Amino acid sequence: MAKGITDRELNGLVAHPPAERMDIKDGTIDGLVVRAGPRGRPTWTLRFRVRGAGGTTERGTKLNGAKYHRVSLGSYPAVSIKAARKKALEYLAAIERGEDPIAVLEDQAVRRRDTVNVLVEEYLVHAEQSMRSWRNAKWLLNRHVVSAWGERPAGTITERDARKLVEDVRKGAPDPVTGDTAMRNGAGSEVRKWGSMLFEWARKHGKVKSNPFKDVPVPKLGQRQRFLSMEEAWAVWAAAGKLRDPWGQALRLLMLTGCRENEICAARWQWFDASDRTLTIPPEHYKSGRNFLVTLPDEAVAIIEGLPRWKGGDFLLSTTNGEKPIAGIARKVIDDLHEKAEAILKRPMARFSLHDLRRTVRTHLSRLGVEEVVAELVLGHALKGLQARYNVYGFADEKRAALTKWAQALSTKVTH
């Protein structure tokens, strides 16, 4: 049995370093040596070949001009003789299994360098160039992913970490303004979606080995309850006034009337009656297949009358000289609106959808003391029976009074 290096010999090197660098073989494991010199402590190193690389065939045949690899295992006495031999045997066993320790070390170095914070920054550069919803990705990834893992190496994030993050977001506190608990599931779903897109992009670009969100289930969404507080509603109203035409007018009309997106975006001049201050939506454009009368407050009438009269067509809101209506309000417009509203509020604000604006109108009508039946009719929720079918103008005065009260509240800045 080969005689191995002893603690006595190593302690002698520590106490009396050699004048020149020298390598001392361990004697029990091929390639394991102690490198000592005039400065520093003796250091354990392992010299080895990798099969199929560095001049060695897959069968282990050495090639002329083959290169050896050398790795440091630590310095003595911090790494003892026993520990050094154990590390060396682990490396050699990995090599026998066909693994490349050098590649593993390089991968670990990359994982330490590329933190989640850096990964998100790089991904958002890509997203801004290729995705319309990149602002939503930026807001969500920074708020949830970077805040949780920012300084961690991206390659160390596991599926268990991803599951915990989604679950933590899903079980987080209800929205402080609305008390909405369904929003938590929605936020959890968005974290899972954007987290998966982030790490899948990173995987494809060789920045991580796997996508930890891949097998994380999508949280089931409950009934959505998001609506804007009056402070938020005022900020969104003010922000809409800063958007370019016709998006600002479209959003303000949605906020003033509580109508659905397609009802306002597809509106025609022939639907508008300036003298009666109404907008009559025909059955083919209304969800329930019946005429619906929108009783416009003065603020909505002023917006409509301020729109250009197109020569190419009859649509109120158009970017094609009236030939075609706007197809809807794009996500990037909502992102811009949200960003401007947050700047006005000077604080973050929970995300909202266009339908949440409709829910906002309904919620605040009740807060303003509007009778339930009138508030429901404002949104076009039909009465039962023959009255709903034939009485298009029923409750017109009450609906106008309700929306006028809402418009006044909406255009009044909240100071508390």
Image: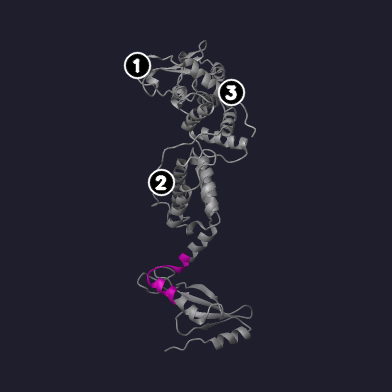
**First in sequence: mark 3 or mark 1?**
1
Q: Is residue 312 visible?
A: no
Q: Which residue is mark 2?
A: 219
Residue for badge 1? 386
From this view, report whether residue 230 is shown above or below residue 13.
above
**Position of residue 11 measured from the top left corner of the image (x, y, whole percent):** 58, 85
Task: Report the colour scheme.
Answer: one colour
Look at the numbered disc 3 and give the secondary structure of its residue: helix
Q: Which span is picked out in magenta?
A: 89-104
Give me the disc on residue 408.
3
Residue 15, horizontal then vertical, whole percent: 63, 85
Q: How many marks?
A: 3
Query: Picture quarter containing residue 244?
Result: top right
| Residue 91 screen position, x and y as percent | 44, 73
Q: Nearer the viewer, residue 275 or 359?
A: 359
The one of 256 and 268 positioned closer to us in this rendering? 256
Q: Amino acid at mark 3?
A: Gln
**Residue nearest the observer in this picture, 365 or 26:** 365
* Label 1 crowd bin: few (<14), some (14–19), many (20+), radius 10 Å: few
* SS of the residue under disc 1: helix
Looking at the rendered image, the disc whose residue lies closer to the viewer, 3 or 2, is 3
Q: Nearer the viewer, residue 171 or 129?
A: 171
Could you tell me the amino acid type at mark 2? Pro
